[in-house]
Image: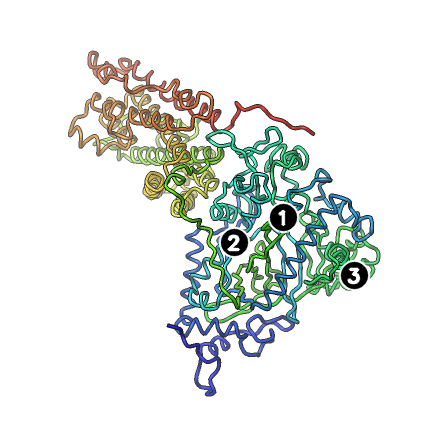
Amino acid sequence: MTKTPLPLFDDDPGATSVCALAAQAALPAAPGHYDELRVGGRSGQPLAPHWARFFEWLGFEGFGDLNRRRHSLEQQLRDNGVTYNVYADENSQQRPWALDLFPLILTPTEWAAIEAGVLQRTRLLNQMLADLYGPRELLQRGLLPPALVQGHPGYLRPMQGVQPPGGTWLHIAAFDLARGPDGRWWVVNHRTQAPSGLGYLLENRIAISRQFPKAFAEMRVQRLAASYKALMQGLCSLSPKGREARVALLTPGPYNETYFEHAYLARYLGLSLVEGSDLTVRDRRVFLKTLNGLEPVDVLIKRLDDQWLDPLELRSDSALGVPGLMQAVRAGHVLLANAPGSAPLESCALLGFLPAICEHLLGEPLALPSLATWWCGEAASLHQGLPLIKQSVVKSTWPHWGSEAVIGPSLTPAGVEQITGRIVRQPDEYTLQAYLPLSQQPTWRGGDIAPRPAMLRVFALADGPQSWRVLPGGMVRLAPPGQAIASMQRGGSSADCWVLTDGEVDRTSLLHSAPSTLSMAMQKRIVTSRSAENLFWLGRYTERAENSVRLARTALRSLQGESEGEGESSPELQAWLSACAKYNGLVLPAVPDAQQSPRVFERALLAMLSPDSPAQSVGYTLKALSRAASHVRERLSQEQRNLIERLQAEFSAQTQGLGADDDFATQEALDALEQASELLSAITGAQTDRMMRDDGWRMLSIGRHIERLATLSHALAEALQSGAAFEHSGFEALLTFFDSTITFHAHYQQRRDLVALLDMLVTQRDNPRSLAWVLATLRSRLQKLPTAHVGGPDQLLQGLPDPQSWDLIALSGAMSGPAGQQNAYLGLIELLQTCTQAAYDLSDRLGHLYFSHADRVNRSFLL
């Protein structure tokens, strides 16, 4: 049934349509700015027809529901883990992605002009790169100053004379557009090295279309999937391997400001997300380090700037790139998207020279104009531009190497004088660009429709040799309230962009036709060595956190006179807890033992729970757990990531200052540990029941069981050596640490003899906390690892104790000697120490064999 649109206005002023409600709620745009909501962009005019249609399809009920939808949108982004790192360093906090409720809506006519202009610019920039790294005719004819190109820090001399596959230098190009007060669109910036936004705009589209499904469908909004599919097909067609090309997405890592979208885009496109350390160059070919050995890579979509690509030929201090990568590029063995060397195109100074260059290279005028630009390195431009500082934006000529832009209209006379002096002293480092009041996009603010300055980033994607298409939409950036610059780093937000069409909506999907049962069975997700290593440590830190939490709770209860058994805790128990606490990093080695100074030991244990303590206690381990999870976020469910982040944040907040002399500190710590234990149970449950049983999961499981073997075997050996295992409170505490109390008492009722204890904790094959079960599980996991490496799983099994040879009677040799004599168990203690060492040895061999690829030494760097 088709909905009858509501009238735009009613003849009766007292009657109200939904469009009239929207018009009444809309605040006027600032003077001198284009109002995206209104006809002709002028405040006071009726709603633009496409906005009227939007509110008509929204209806009265939908308009009254906007606050709830805004809260729902924020919750959806939090649940999906959409983040943006404001500062790209290890200690920064990830900020939730900010997305406004209303999209920017473009009519078919508006979009046709943008599309044509962007396609022309992409062709132009591609030809410019071919010339700059080829005949350099533009420099010889004086159409471009050599200092602006060859003096640019991003001009790559190693690319001189290189011909990229298909003559295509740019595979993904982004253009920042702004609409001026007259309604015309202007190009403000080019982004050609590693443009961001393709992942975020996709998430924006999915989130907003869910909030307005009827309007999205009925207004014939053009879809995005066809452009992404065309990009992947275009990249494969440019690769020598064709459709069989292996494509990966190269990311700087989880501390990059846009890492979320790297992981999101890789998952959406079905690509391996790789870091520089995942790749290696052998014989001028690029390979991916995987658990199955080295796998060739034919195409890399890079998300790091060119200077960091290869420490051998570019920045020698780069830890993000791949040594020898430039050799592989020049040899034509790997396609980089985009080809290295496009940094000079990102300089805003270039915009002033494009009209003449376009006439020369394409024989036609520039369709989409650039803002008036003066590069101060030219005397004429400097003379012309200096008087216009108050009407301009002062920018660094070299993006990423200079300071932030300065808005001329906001400068005081003293500020103008100061910036003028800086320009005169170093003119080539500055570029003036005409100030453009940005158009103002409607945003929903809890009852009002408030205008915010907006800038649109549009993408051109290669779909074949020197052929591109423009993705129908883009990422809109909104300036923070009260500011004029649309920047995410400065606290701005984003919006979706709807491109309307008069024709059919493209229904292309990236979901391929259903494969055969055989081909589905042959598909196997590649697990990179880095991902495997991080999953391995994710497993170890998860197990370590569980053990540390359990040990800390046991120790604190014992110190409070609440030992697991009845009555006071014994000196033997105190000695055992002290030894285990120091071994597991709950207290520093210099702290007096609990039996010597219980109060000092307790205060130290409380103080060390925080992640900022010098000991590797619970808080430290939870922080390490969160860090390991951030490195493999593409492999974890959002629910599991949320649990890990919540656990780390809440425990950190609860344990701040617990070392102070506070009578309630111990109880507060116990409450925090109890909550941490519950969240860890949920995390381990997600690891056990909600992850694919591939090689990555096996590494996680192996990590957990290596940690469990080392920790529990050491704890039992210490219990025997200290005598804690021979007395009541220590007996019960040991069961608690092994998380086997309920199982033991259900199995053995009221028995308290050591034979029963050893059966449960050492030889019992059905108890997942027993050493025999852990070793058997380890063996099973190891035997299923890839066998591509020399030795493979068989090499890993060497030195690992085999529980099948264990005999309970032999392990309980003290039955024939005096009860409670620790020296009667020297053989068992030696076996337990062997288990502990075997766990650490296995960890080392595993890393050498599967993570470092140290056995593959055939490298070739031919300069």
Q: Position of residue 321 (x, y in %)?
A: 60, 37
Q: Residue at x 32, y 36 (%)?
A: 553
Type of amino acid under label 2 = Tyr
Task: Give the CA distance from mark 2 to mark 3.
Answer: 37 Å
Closer to us: 227 or 456: 227
Residue extending farthest top: 816
Element on which disc 3 rests: helix
Q: Residue at x 83, y 60 (%)?
A: 383
Question: Can residue 667 be seen?
Answer: no
Element on which disc 1 rests: loop
Judge depth for marks 3 and 1 and give the one in front. Answer: 1
Tell me the number on the disc at residue 200. Answer: 2
Q: Position of residue 600 (x, y in %)?
A: 39, 32
Q: Is residue 790 left or right of residue 34?
A: left
Type of amino acid under label 1 = Pro
Judge depth for marks 2 and 1 and give the one in front. Answer: 1
Task: Give the CA distance from mark 2 to mark 1.
Answer: 27 Å
Type of amino acid under label 3 = Gly
Element on which disc 2 rests: helix
**Residue identifier under label 3:** 385
Residues at marks 3 and 1 touching, judged by CB atoms closer than 8 Å? no
Closer to us: 684 or 736: 684
Q: Position of residue 195 (x, y in %)?
A: 60, 50
Closer to us: 649 or 843: 843
**Residue identifier under label 1:** 465
Tell me which label, 3 or 1, sits earlier in the chain. Answer: 3
Judge depth for marks 2 and 3 and give the one in front. Answer: 2
